[in-house]
Amino acid sequence: MVAPPSSPLDEHDLHRIVFAAQSDLGEGILVVDRTRVVYANDAYCRIVGRTREEVQGLASLLDIVVPEDRQAIYEREMRRGRGEDVPLFYETTIVRPDGTRVPIEIGLRPAAGDVPGRYVSVVRDVTSRRASEAALRETEERFRRAFSDAATGMAIYDTQGRFQRVNQALCDLLGYNEEEMLKLTYREVTHPEDLEALVALGRQFISASATDSVRFERRYRRKDGATVWAHVNSSPILDDQKRTLYYVTHIFDISARKAAEDLTRKDQVSRRVVRHILRDISDRPSTSTAIRRDLGRSLAGETSEETIKGCLDFFGSLGIGALEVESGEGDRYSIRGRDLLEMTPGAGVPTCHIALGFLEGCVARLHGGNALGAELSCQSTGQEACRFVVHARAAPGEKLSGRS
C-alpha cells in the first residue's frame, strides 16, 4: 500500500522544526529586535541559566557577560553596525545567576526580512571543547618537556628522513646545534659503513605493520668526525588513515658499553694467547722450574686486584687451572689448586711451579717485600688437590702492608 503524499511544509512550520532541532542539539537561538529580546529557545535559556522571562527582561545582553569582555564586545558590535568587516563568530564567557562561568561561542548576523535592527544570535556552550583543548595543551606541554628535558637523545623526522625536531641531548651527542640539525637528514649523521644497512632497515620498517616500532644499534658520525655508538628505538606517528607522518626516535649512547665490549674481546683474545703459551711451556719437559716460577710471578704483575681472592679469580679466568684459599692468617696463606696445566703426563720436572710463582708474586704485591712459597702436595702424585703454602717476608727496614 502506497502512503499518501504528505502536505508541503509552510515556512512557519519549517522554521518551527528547525528551531526545535537546534534547541534539542544544545544550540541556543536568540532573536533581538534592536535591544529587546523577542525570542529565546530552551537551549539558550539552559546555557545562560535563566528562564525565558528572565532573558527577555534583561536590560542589556552585556549584563551577563564577564566584565573583562564587555568593552571588546561593545566595540565589535558598533563596528558591525557601521558595516565594517567583523568576524561572524567569537568567544566570550557569561555568568549565570549562581555565579557559574560558562564559556560560549556566539555567532551574530542580521535577521532575514525587512525589519531593521533585528539580529539572530546562535550560542553554543563550549565548556567541553575548552576542557578538551586544555587537556590537549597539557598533553602537548608534557610531551614538550619530556622531549626537551630528556637525558637521552630524541628526534622527530619525516618520511624523507629530514629532522623536524631534536632535543638538546641529541645535539650534544652529535656535536651540532639545533639549527644545524634541522638542516640535516638522518643519513647525513649516519656512519658511512652503517648507511646501507640502515636504508635496508628503513624499507623493512615501511613494509612492517604501521604501528610497530623498531630497535637496533647503529653508529652515528659526529660533526667533529668522531664515531658514536647508539641504541635506537623508533616508532611511527600516524594520521587518521594509518599513514605514517613522522617517526619519533629515542637515541641512547652506548659508546662506553661498546668500548668495554671491545676491551673484553681483546682481553679474551689476550688470555687465549697466554693460555696457549702456558700450555706450550707446560708440555715441554725441558722448561726449567725456575723459568716456570718466574713466568708465574710475571702473571701476578698483570693483575691489579687488591685481595688474594681477586688474584686467584684472575688466575682462574686464564683457563690454566683453579686456585682457592683454604686458610689465611695475616701474611700467610694455604692455597688449594686443581687442574693446573703443569700436570702434563710425561713431564720430567716437578709440576705446578707456574701457579706457585703466581702465588708468590701476588702475596708479595699485596703485602710488600718478598714472598716465599712451597708446594706441599700435587695431583700429579695422586693427591686430591695441589696444596701450597705462601707467606710474605718484609724487605730489610720495611713493614708488611697487611692487605688480604
Image (tube, rainbow, N blue to C red):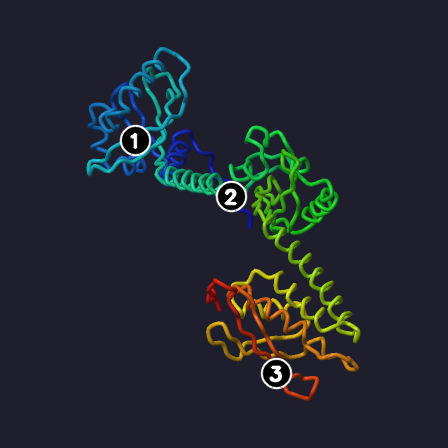
Identify the element where label 1 is drawn: strand
> Mark 1 and 3 residues: CB-CB less than 8 Å, in contact?
no
Point out residue 353 in the picture as x, y percentages from the top left corner.
67, 74
Identify the element where label 3 is drawn: strand
Q: Looking at the picture, does residue 119 appear above or below residue 286?
A: above
Residue found at x 21% / y 27%: 58
Circle 3 sits on which residue?
Answer: 376
Quarter of the view holding residue 222: top right
Give the mark nearest the N terminus, 3 or 2.
2
Residue 375 or 266: which is nearer the viewer?
375
Question: Looking at the rendered structure, which numbered label has been put on residue 350?
Answer: none
Residue found at x 58% / y 44%: 249
Q: CA distance from mark 3 to mark 2?
A: 121 Å
Circle 2 sits on which residue?
Answer: 4
Closer mark to the observer between disc 2 and disc 1:
1
Residue found at x 64% / y 79%: 338
Residue 204 or 128: which is nearer the viewer?
204
Q: Looking at the picture, does residue 192 appear above or below residue 10?
A: below
| Label 2 neighbour load within 10 Å: few <14, some 14-19, many 20+ | few
Quarter of the view holding residue 46: top left
Q: CA distance from mark 2 to mark 1?
A: 50 Å
Tag 2: amino acid: Pro
> Mark 3 and 2 residues: CB-CB less than 8 Å, in contact?
no
Point out residue 266 in the picture as x, y percentages from the top left corner.
69, 56
Identify the element where label 2 is drawn: loop
Q: Which residue in the rendered view is the most extreme toward the front?
A: 396
Tag 1: amino acid: Thr
Question: Looking at the rendered structure, which numbered label has been put on residue 93?
Answer: 1
Point out residue 371 in the picture as x, y percentages from the top left corner.
56, 70
Q: Looking at the picture, does residue 400 appear above or below residue 92?
A: below
